[in-house]
Image: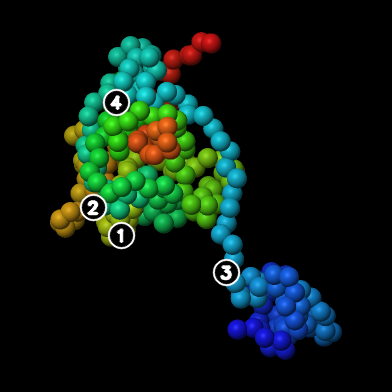
C-alpha cells in the first residue's frame, strides 16, 4: 500500500521507469517528487501510472450501420432479395452445438492466426444445439449466408455482432481498419462458426485443420466438422464461401432485446453469381 515518503517506480505515463517519492495523495493519484536532469521536481502522477490501480477498460465508439439486406426475407423468399430468380436457394444446414454459448466467427483455413486475427463475440446465448439454414449461391455453388436460430420468435431488429473493445481495437490495428468501423473478421474464402470452447482444440489442430476443411467442403459447401474424439467433441460449422473478403455477422433481436438469431453474411458481389435486387422507393 502506498504511503507518504514511500518510493515507487512509475509503471506508465510520461514518467515511466522513474523513481518517485510519494508526498501526498492528490486527486486520482499522488503528488510525487521525481528527479529529471539531476534536479528534483514535484509532479502529480495518477494511481494508474503508479501501478496502484488497474487501467480502465478500453472503449471505442463504433459507427452504427444498417444491415445491407433484409435477412428475414432472404431466408424465406430469396428471390425478393437476389436476382435472377432461383439464384439463391435456402436449405437446412448442419446443427451446431454450443457448449458455452460464446460464439466465434473465423476462417478455419487461417487457424494458425486464431489469437491474432479473431475473438469471440461479446454477446452470448444459452448453451444448446441450434439448427442452421444456409443460403446457397447456385451459380458458384458456394454459401452466401448462414443463419443460426436460437428461439422461434420474429426478429424485430438486427445489429452487428461485435467483440470486446480490447479485441476490437487490437484486430482493427492489425488490419489497419478505422477503429470506429463495425467489426468484421478476416475471411480468405472459408468461414466457420463455433463455440469459443473449441478454441483450444483449434489451436491443437491448426496444422491439419485447413486440409480437413477442404476435404469436408469438397462434398458439400456446408459441413459440421468435429475436432477430436471427445464426447461431446468441439464442433465447427464450416462454410465454403468465396475467394476472400471480410465477413460480418448480425444478431437478430426480438422486441424485448433477446437474441433469437445470428446471420453470417458471406455475400461477395465479385464472386457469387447472384445479384442484390435494387430496392425502389
Q: CA distance from mark 2 to mark 4?
A: 25 Å
Q: Which residue is mark 3?
A: 54
Which of labels 2 and 4 is toward the front? Answer: 2
Q: Is residue 255 visible?
A: yes
* Mark found first going from the N terminus, 3 or 2: 3
> How many other residues sit within 10 Å of disc 1, few (<14), some (14-19) or many (≥20)?
few
Circle 4 SS class: strand
Which residue is more in the foreground, 65 or 4?
4
Percent coordinates x, y for residue 139 in the rendering: 31, 20
Q: CA distance from mark 1 to mark 3?
A: 28 Å
In the rendered structure, find residue 200 and report the number of the disc placed on it. Answer: 1
Percent coordinates x, y for residue 12 in the rendering: 65, 71
Q: The N terminus is located in which quarter?
A: bottom right
Q: CA distance from mark 3 to mark 2?
A: 35 Å
Which of labels 1 and 3 is toward the front? Answer: 3
Q: Which residue is mark 2?
A: 234
In the rendered structure, find residue 136 and report the number of the disc placed on it. Answer: 4
* Mark found first going from the N terminus, 1 or 2: 1
Which residue is more in the foreground, 139 or 20?
20
Q: Is residue 177 left or right of residue 146?
A: right
Where, by quadrant of the figure, is residue 147 drawn?
A: top left
Amino acid at each position: 500500500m502506498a504511503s507518504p515518503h514511500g518510493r515507487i517506480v512509475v509503471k506508465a505515463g510520461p514518467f515511466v521507469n522513474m523513481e518517485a517519492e510519494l508526498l501526498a495523495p492528490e486527486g486520482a493519484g499522488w503528488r510525487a517528487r521525481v528527479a529529471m536532469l539531476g534536479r528534483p521536481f514535484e509532479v502529480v502522477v495518477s494511481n494508474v501510472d503508479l501501478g496502484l490501480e488497474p487501467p480502465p477498460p478500453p472503449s471505442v465508439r463504433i459507427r452504427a450501420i444498417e444491415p445491407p439486406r433484409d435477412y428475414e426475407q432472404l431466408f424465406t423468399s430469396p428471390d425478393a432479395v437476389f436476382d435472377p430468380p432461383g439464384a439463391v436457394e435456402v436449405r437446412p444446414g448442419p446443427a451446431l452445438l454450443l457448449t458455452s454459448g460464446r460464439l466465434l466467427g473465423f476462417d478455419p483455413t487461417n487457424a494458425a492466426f486464431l489469437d491474432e486475427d479473431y475473438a469471440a463475440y461479446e454477446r452470448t446465448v444459452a448453451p444448446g444445439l441450434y439448427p442452421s439454414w444456409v443460403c446457397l449461391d447456385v451459380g458458384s455453388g458456394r454459401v452466401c449466408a448462414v443463419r443460426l436460430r436460437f428461439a422461434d420468435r420474429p426478429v424485430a431488429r438486427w445489429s452487428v455482432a461485435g467483440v470486446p473493445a480490447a479485441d476490437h481495437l487490437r484486430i482493427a490495428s492489425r488490419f489497419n481498419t478505422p477503429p470506429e468501423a463495425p467489426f468484421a473478421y478476416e475471411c480468405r474464402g472459408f468461414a466457420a462458426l463455433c463455440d469459443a470452447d473449441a478454441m483450444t482444440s483449434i489451436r491443437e489442430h491448426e496444422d491439419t485443420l485447413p486440409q480437413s476443411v477442404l476435404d469436408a467442403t469438397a462434398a458439400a459447401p456446408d459441413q459440421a466438422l468435429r475436432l477430436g474424439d471427445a464426447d461431446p467433441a468441439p464442433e465447427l460449422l464450416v462454410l465454403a464461401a468465396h475467394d476472400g473478403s471480410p465477413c460480418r455477422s448480425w444478431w437478430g433481436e426480438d422486441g424485448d432485446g433477446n437474441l433469437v438469431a445470428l446471420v453470417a453474411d458471406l455475400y461477395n458481389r465479385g464472386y457469387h453469381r447472384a445479384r442484390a435486387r435494387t430496392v425502389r422507393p
